[in-house]
Image: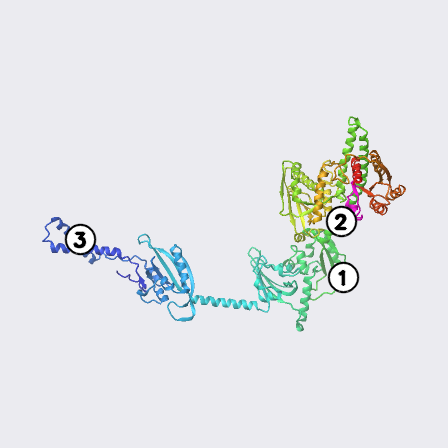
Amino acid sequence: MTETTPAAGHPAPLVDRSAKPRSVSRLIFLALIMIGASVVFFLFKDRLNSDLMLGVLGVLAVVGIFFLVSTVIGFVTIMPKTTTDPLARAFIDTHPEGTLVTDEKGRVIYANQAYGKITGTTSASDVQSIEAILSRHRDSAEAVYRLTNAMREGEAGQEEFRMTHALNDSQDTGTGHWYRLRGRPVSDGEAKGDAKLMAWQLSDISQERTEQEMVFKELQNAINYLDHAPVGFFSAGRDGGIVYLNATLADWLGIDLTAFAPGKMMLRDLVAGAGMALVDSVQAEPGLNSTAQLDLDLLKSNGQSFPVRLVHRVTATRDGSPGESRTIVISRDDGVSGARDVANAEMRFTRFFNNTPMAIASVDAQGKILRTNGPFLQMFNGLVSRDDMERGAFFEKVLREDDRKLFADALGHAADKQGDIAPIDSRRADDEERHFRLYVNAVIEHTEEAPEETAIIYAVETTEQKALEAQMAQTQKMNAVGTLAGGIAHDFNNVLTAILLSADHLLMSLRPADSSFADLIEIKRNANRAAVLVRQLLAFSRKQTMRPTVLSMTDVIGDLRMLVDRLTGTNVKLDLEFGRDLWLVKTDLGQFEQVLINLAVNARDAMPEGGAITVRTRNVESQEIEQLNHRGMEVGDYVLIEVADEGTGIAPDVLEKIFEPFFTTKDVGKGTGLGLSMVYGIVKQSGGYIYPESEIGKGTTFRIYLPRHVEDEAEKAAALAETEAAAGRAAAEGTPGGSAKAGSSEPEDLTGVSAVVLLVEDEEAVRRGGKRMLEARGYEVHEAGSGVEALEVLQELEGKVDIVVSDVVMPEMDGPTLLTELRKDYPDMKFIFVSGYAEDAFAKNLPADAKFGFLAKPFSLKQLATAVREMLDE
């Protein structure tokens, strides 16, 4: 084998067995055969008799001689020169990293001089493979194993490892050595079957590691210096998240650095009061920086304030959006005295100035803003900025056009040094919902720092106060209307009761074939329709009869689905979304069904082109209620029922009036204006709240919050009894009102059987009609126009009365007072209250052990007779 001659100017490789000896051997073998044939021909030509053999040997001899001559003159070469690129070979041979190439069996094919230097090998015979050198060391064996497996799978890899001894030195230096080992498979294209070679690169990176450790130590020292600097420091990202704060600031604020995560804590969480408005006021021009000194308070982890001075620097991106910020924090401890007393006093004043709950600004005679505090920038954010004030912003910029004249007059009074200047109520120029009150005070003595100051303006936000005033006015209005509606309903009930009793009396004397019978039926039917309107008025005034039971809204809405589907029509889709594990509520089943039906019908009417009505339910815990901050709503656990549509929406001015009775936006004859009033009253009487939300063109959502009910054992037993009673009521007559024991079936025999009844009613028509009806049933009836008169009648009859039927609201003495007086002398006297108001409206004024029946107005003859008979039979 002929060794490859190295290129000039670089050392030869330590080992290079990359030449291919197999083709050379074949040429040599062929040449020897030809030469041998020539020798045989010349030595034995005289002994060969065959002409053919002589010819063959002659040809071989000639070819052999020609091959020898051509080799001598260089026309034919036995070993062709390698075609390897000398530049590439020179690069590999002189590469500072140790390079080794092995075959699949680990036999060394090539190794450069750097490999020998790193491994401590000086001769080609001593060169060993990577596996042989590193696998016997515990520090490197695992790395070699991983790389070898990766290369056998056709993948390249890299490993770094530390060894206690250098590979070229057997003695321990005590510092250790770091090595980087790379490996990749290489295909040998000239070999049969494209055998894979393994190329290894080994380098000593101890110096590189040492430099990295030095840089790391210097960085640690720098961080240590920054952490223990006598001032605080923090850095915030574009979103205001704190990405770094030093140990000094963390110690001041009581923040545990071990639990600190970059970006989790926000800058607004560190700044107390309105100080964040000052921080946000520092803005930079696109691509530039802006630095400002700010005196404000930071918040400690225990909620205490910590006075500081910030040197706050903000960068801006090229598009002008806020960038990152770097801030130095200087403690403004008030304990320093001596030469710094004046500075400390100024700091204390600045602290009070920026942390006062009212916005403060000083202006000159023309109204130009000279100085402001943090709350001012916070209150008028978006209207006035720090940059605007530097360019000469005027105070009138924050006011509506209508209020600028009042402010100019107040500023003129301040310029005249007047002391009594009336406050100004105004609203933000860009937001009609934000109210504030301005107090303009004249500056009597000017300072050297601001000789042009004319007035100091104090601004107090009154948005919440205005909202409460509006809510109070609305509540008073609703209560007044409710009282009026209740009074109208009471009187109207008496009229309807008289009409129904008279109609029943006439019907008893007529046959169905009579011509007047149909007219009386029509009178009674229209009286019942009028009774429905009365009940809606009573519902709004929260005086209708309620029989609350413990209910699951999932069951109530599910049972009502088919009815709502029929009411809403085919072009309206009803979607139900039930919350999981819905809490129980306590309300009147029938009344609340009316609430849902009314809202569904209104939603249908709001979608003339069709759409979807969505009813959702879910539990709302007290924490969420507190965050919602609905005005007038007590904090607690509630069940939320939402009824949402995709209709035309409700205008804001109309939304304020939708719960008022007789208010409607529908055409004449298509609505009474009592539907939503009834909804409002039923929800309120159930202890709940209702809040509408609407947007023109996008739909309306009504959110009903019913308080969560926790059922005890006694209520469970009562609920079971009520369920049974409800079955009885379902079979009873479906006319307005109801009997005292509506859950019981009506007795077949309603005759009086000589019972004595005392009928107490201040309305003469009702009293006269009731007496006539009861007498027709065989009762002995005595009447009285008031509670006082009833006691006198009882005294005359010596208490020989079986039952008292009394109105609730009467002059001189009402029904509950009458029952209380009767119990003194006649504790077992049976008593029935008759009223258009709810039973619980007066029952709370009675003794807990009082027993009585209840009959709601208006009532029919049959209902009156049934109530009396059931009470007598009890």
Q: Which residues are magenta?
A: 835-857
Quadrant of image for the C terminus: top right
Q: Residue at x 67, y 56 (%)?
A: 380
Q: Work out whether residue 18 or residue 869 is closer to the camera in this orientation and state it.
A: 869
> Can residue 647 be seen in this snapshot?
no
The amino acid type of the residue labelled 2 equals Ala
In percent of width and height, residue 634 lies at 71, 52
Which image quadrant is residue 195 in? bottom left
In percent of width and height, residue 90 lies at 34, 61
Q: Work out whether residue 811 or residue 648 is closer to the camera in this orientation and state it.
A: 811
The amino acid type of the residue labelled 1 equals Lys
Q: Secondary structure at mark 3?
A: helix
**What residue would you read off at disc 1?**
417
Q: How many marks?
A: 3
Q: Dot 1, crowdedness within 10 Å: few (<14), some or many (≥20)? A: some
The amino acid type of the residue labelled 3 equals Val
Q: Of label 3 and label 2, which has the lower sequence position?
A: 3
Residue 847 within the magenta-colored segment of the rendering: yes
Q: Of label 3 and label 1, which has the lower sequence position?
A: 3
Q: Which is the main secondary structure of the residues drawn in magenta?
A: loop
Which image quadrant is residue 499 in? top right
